[in-house]
Amino acid sequence: MYSNGAVSLDSSKEPQQVKTIVESNRHLFEQNADELDEAQDLLEKQGPLEDAWALIAPESEAERLEAQVEKEHLDDEDGSEIPDLDILNKKVRKGTDFEVRQSIFTCQQIQHLLRQLNIEQKRVFYQIRQWCLDKVNGKNPHPFKVFINGGAGTGKSHLIKCLCYETNKILSPHAPNPDDIVVLITAPTATAAFNIGGTTLHQAFSLSKSLPFPYIYKRDDEINKLRTKLQNLQILIIDEISMHSVPLDSLHIFATNKEIDSHNSKMIDKVCEETETIMAQDYDRNPQTGELILRPAPYDSTHDYLPAQLLIGPNARVMLTRNIDITIGLVNGVIGTVISILPGQKGSSLPHAIKVLFDNENIGRKPITSSHSTEHIPIDITPIEESLRKNAVRYQFPLQLAWACTTHKVQGITTDKAVISMKNIFAAGMAYVALSRVKSKDGLLLQDLDEDKIYCTEQISTALQRMPKYLVEQHYDQNFKQNQLRILLHNIQGLIPHIEDLQANSDIQNVNFICLTETWMESNSVSPNLTNFNLIHKPRSSSYSSAKGIFEDLSNKKHGGVGIYVRNQQQYTQLTFESCNIECVGLRIENIKTNIVVIYRPESYTTSIFLEQLQRLLVAIPQDDGSTIVLGDFNEDILKSNSAIEMFMKQFGFMQILHNPTTDGDTLIDHVYVRGKLQISLDTIQTYYSYHNMVLLQIPVD
């Protein structure tokens, strides 16, 4: 009909060829059909891409996100030059509104971090991950509290980033609404919050800038707003210490502002050839008319306010003292170097801007994952408005000199070198905050050492002692015995996209054989290299030799495929199976006289037909006085129903030895069947990159 048929859609006109009509409509309604088919094939082979729109149209995505950020700050910018019109800022400062900032890290960025987790970090990561899986699988696990401690640069924030991403990925799809917050990552300071992609505790919970004692409870409308926003919150993460690095000559840390002022004054005279004193512009507000009148000189003020006068110059080390834009890292506590001072407009005593090159090169960049320039460029810092007491307003740059900082200000900073004065430490925990800023003792120089000032409150000490250990004992011995042979079963859901994850997995370092299902590789695929291993592989397309309809359909489907990575110098013989319409590969391990056969059964493979082919396969396995292990993904959950496959295998003398779930969905569809007298111990090992856990078999070798 398509090639030769014709139809008449209008009796007054000649009939038209069906092919002509179809092709015309296809051209009209199926534009880029070939490209879409190719994209669909790529999606099926490699899975969905993170931030795909940003990769397809980076300019459009950049413009959209930039416009969104600009829209959020539009009213601020419109009113910032005229103090009388700054109504929006006054409302925000009351603390009645808050915005929760979610993690901005992409899948690719997090995968890189996940591959770098050490053994201890992985144990924490997977235990919390398992709690999330139990939660979504209806097991109602007990609430947990975890305290993670360690010095500067030991990887606490690294672990938190991984946990935030993974827990969100598991819990979010099960939230009642797509925008519900299920995992909230916070920090006490904006510096720490930016570096972990979170928000401050004050912003997240609408806390006032100062928390008076006794605590003043929030109004009912504020509480209701928080309850509505956070009603489905499952995990709250509080990061006390960030990963912000300060690559400078030794940072000096003092307990008091008087000490840092003295040190900074000496340094600016020594380092800066040219300096400029920038006087704040203070305005008095007429209580009757609201008119603002510029004072001839600024008020004297304490360190709590923007400085009345700021001595600064090119090459000066400075710290930002207010949160300007958390989304791009312009937050209280970040440190940089002054590049230049841009003069102000004619008649203005304030410079237009101070260019600062911040140490953290990510500061100032929009949270966009498209192909933006990675050049480290200075940021223009402009004056901001701040209310003073006595009904006055001040305009000044939110900067202070930062060759030296107070202990309070350095909380959230990690540095290679620091000079710490303990002379005037006056509170519990201050010494710890200062001492834990450096990555190693080699970068630490102490002045006025007084051991009595290194202490914490008795309540904290007691609480730490009472905390139970969170990590359970290891399920299997990391220090494997040399007289054991180890076989790993893993549905990897794409070998090529996950080869780096497999390479980074420390659990494979002492394994002899890695049995893989769902490799998703074709006959012409280049075998991914895994150091110290050789790959035996069979793609789906060459697994079904029969021309029977069901086998042809299975052969043409995407994905599938099985393989075995064999460690170098491991003795084995590859098995061949003729006319077995099953995705399988096998080998014989001579030193334990055991056959291994890896199988993948697609869900669409009818069980009765599969069992017919499985029987042919079992008969084809060499029969001798040794043992046989048949393992793989059979896509039949033994935990939820009577397994036809398990009953069938029993008829051939096989016993299924796995009894615990092997997937994130709490199912047991990965089976291990054993025939013979082998003594096998089993363990399951979690993975972040696949729906399936790995299964480790350990067999004693004589």
Image (cartoon, rainbow, N blue to C red):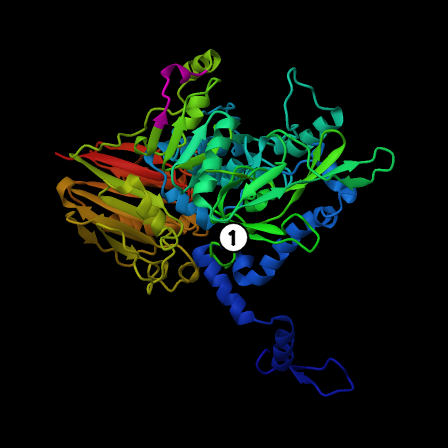
Judged from the image, the secondary structure of the residue bearing numbered disc 1 is loop
Q: Name the side, left or right, on which 279 lies relative to 415.
A: right
Q: Give the residue drawn at x 36%, y 36%.
A: 417
Spot the residue most to the right.
Answer: 288
Q: Quadrant of the N terminus?
A: bottom right
Disc 1 residue crowd, few under 14, some 14–19, many 20+, Cα 10 Å? many
- Residue 225 spot, x, y in % from top left: 71, 31
Q: Name the side, left or right, on which 378 lies relative to 530.
A: right
- Residue 38, visible in the rendered structure: yes
- Residue 28 spot, x, y in % from top left: 65, 74
- Residue 485 spot, x, y in % from top left: 20, 38
Tell me how many marks there are.
1
- Residue 621, visible in the rendered structure: no
Q: Give the residue drawn at x 54%, y 66%.
A: 36
Q: Which residues are magenta?
A: 446-456
Q: Give the residue drawn at x 78%, y 40%.
A: 293
| Residue 466: quarter of image | top left
Compare residues 271 and 367 and report the one nearer the observer: 271
| Residue 227: quarter of image | top right
Compare residues 679 and 347 and report the one nearer the observer: 347
Q: Image height check: is 224 above or below 492?
A: above
Residue at the spot of label 1: 378
Compare residues 222 and 107 and report the one nearer the observer: 222
Compare residues 205 and 6 and report the one nearer the observer: 205
Q: Amino acid at mark 1?
A: Pro
Q: Is residue 115 magenta?
A: no
